[in-house]
Image (cartoon, helix red, strand yellow):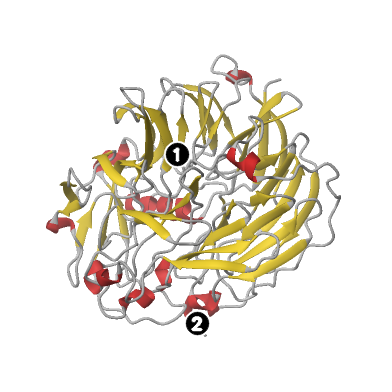
Amino acid sequence: MHGLFRSVSLIALVLAGPALAEIADYSDVTAERLTNPEDGNWLQTRRTYDGQAHSPLTQITRDNVAQLTEVWSHPTGPYRPAPEFTALPASGAHQAAAIVNDGVMFMTTHDNQVIAMDAKTGEEHWRYQHPLPPDLVPVHPANRGVALWEDKVFIATQDAMVVALNARTGEKLWSQTMADWLEGYYSTLAPLVVNGKVMAGVSGGEFGIRGFVQAFDAETGDPVWKTYTIPEPGQPGSESWPGDTWQTGGGPIWITGNYDPEANLAYWGVGNAAPWVGALRPGDNLYTTSTIGVNPDTGAIATHFQYHWNDTWDWDEVVPPTLIDLEGENGEAQKLAVRFARNGYIYKLDRSDGKLSFIEGKPYVYQNAFTGLDPETGRPEYNQENLPGLGKRVEFCPSAWGGRDWPAESYDPATATVFISVNENHCGSMEGSPVEYEPGVLFLGSGLEMTPTDAAKDHIGAVQAWDIRTMEKKWQVNFKSPNWGPTLSTAGGLVFLGGTNDAMFRALDAETGDELWSTRLDGGVVSPPTSFEVDGKQYIAVTTGWGVDAERFQGYIDAAWGTKTEVPQGGTVYVFALP
């Protein structure tokens, strides 16, 4: 038996039947199309390699968005309830972006289904179900979407595999195992494909894995390279781990990386160190809570930036920086990597020479664990009163869920503005204790608490707009609810997001933050909205499916306030357009 992962036997998942209908006119996805996608397509989870999650389409504007109506909706299938016997119960969440390639939409579900649909009508072409081990109980039952390359679709799975499908038929072409799920490894991200190499990372930091990102040949599935986020003795950074703690040091990669074609670097965010409390593993603990720049041809780590050393707050820094080319005061182009860290600071980094270098950083939510950042390096100084230790219970703000969690921001290049969903007015506490590693068993060294502050009665969730040129906040819209909504910005001057516990999906004025349109859906939204065009008509797509961390976070709030918030789960793809 292997702890949580072997605690009970679930009903076996069954491989889906034959394809419903072959897609006759499918456009192969080339390197050129991924690098320079057509305005009407959404070919990657954040649309472009730079991760800007911005649509250049202009048909839907701030002047006409109030007329937006539902065109079609499509249920994703039966919803699996949260297992009540797990240590970290959570319902499955739909966290995937709707990927659209010339009228064909691909959507994934929390239980590793892939659905191909007609993006104009919602008619289902085919459906694939990855058969998960019957006794696997996922800690984070979610999947964040597919990657496309040529005539193939790729998905990473809860049992730590990468699967390639025929995009026209849904037929499985190959599969490869990245790691043993019995040891706590799993995968929830959308793969990233660069020049025929399919890259994916692994989750499992809470189980003391040794994190990595791995690349496979898109055609054959053959492994090409594997790069660990925790260096072994003799490798650069190994001196930041005492003894053999590197073997179980965590460092998961569970959000899709961004890619800079000019520098030929894929930027991946690395999560928490294990166990949670840093006193159990003294040192900087590279490359946890960092961004690493990886050569997609070789897997070599060319650069890194660590947001906080010896992580003791479970602040995963897995969201990669948004890559921005910004014209400077003298007309020269600034090549930036901009990141809102889970630790509550926004970082502006230079990436012009293929290295990540600190420019500027400042808090975007209240944070009391740092006394500040070194102005030259960005390395934080810690407030010892808010640093958990062994046998030392300490409170800190924000809580382990951070100022932001995994939901991605968007960036409008016309106004140099980033739009980001945040949560504030919540604090946490930890008290460290020794823990022994056992494969597949939680390896934490601490419990976890979250408590809303008095200010949370006013609001917890918000969406912020930041001018990246000046590093000043332009506006903020507050919600009494937490906000778990990835944002979509458009050239029509709009910002779309869900994320609140009232199951609303909203469109805001990108310049002012004013709400211009909203609709209540059948469930909470924690998936990224996308926009696409078919036959000259612009559409907005989003999928409901509330669960996992949004559900857990809400549960802590209800426990603190003695309330019970019922958030419908949903599980439906919605598509909207103008009449």
Q: Tell me the quarter of the image containing the C terminus.
A: top right
Compared across the picture, whether 316 is left or right of 144 comes to left
Question: Visible in this render: residue 79?
Answer: no
Residue 305 location in percent, x, y? Answer: 32, 52
Q: Residue at x 24, y 70 (%)?
A: 432
Residue 359 vertical placement versus 190 (above, below): above
Q: Nearer the viewer, mark 1 or mark 2?
A: 1
Out of 340 and 36, give the one closest to the viewer: 36
Choose top left, top right, bottom left or bottom right for residue 133.
bottom right
* Image-quadrant location for residue 540: top right
Residue 276, image x and y in percent?
A: 31, 67
In the depicted structure, whether residue 365 falls above or below residue 64: below
Q: Which residue is mark 1?
A: 409
Q: Residues within 10 Å of mark 2 (few under 14, many from 20)?
A: few
Residue that lies at the very extreme toward the top in this rendered image: 63
Viewed as shown, does residue 400 lie left or right of 506? left
Q: Which residue is mark 2?
A: 2
Task: Identify the secondary structure beneath mark 1.
Answer: loop
The answer to whether residue 281 is above or below residue 453 is below
Q: Which residue corresponds to the image point at 26% horizontal and 67% vertical from the top-left? A: 277
Q: Amino acid at mark 2?
A: His
Q: Secondary structure at mark 2?
A: loop
Name of the residue lying farthest toward the bottom: 1
Q: Amino acid at mark 1?
A: Glu
Give the side of residue 71 with respect to residue 90, left or right: right
Q: Which of the two labelled residues, at mark 1 and mark 2, occupies the earlier sequence position?
A: 2
Cα–Cα gap, marks 1 and 2: 37 Å
Residue in the image at 64% along x and 48% along y: 571
Residue 155 location (% of width, % of height): 64, 58
Q: Nearer the viewer, residue 164 or 438?
A: 164
User: Would you call the spot at circle 1 few (<14 residues within 10 Å), some (14-19), or many (20 or more)?
Assistant: many
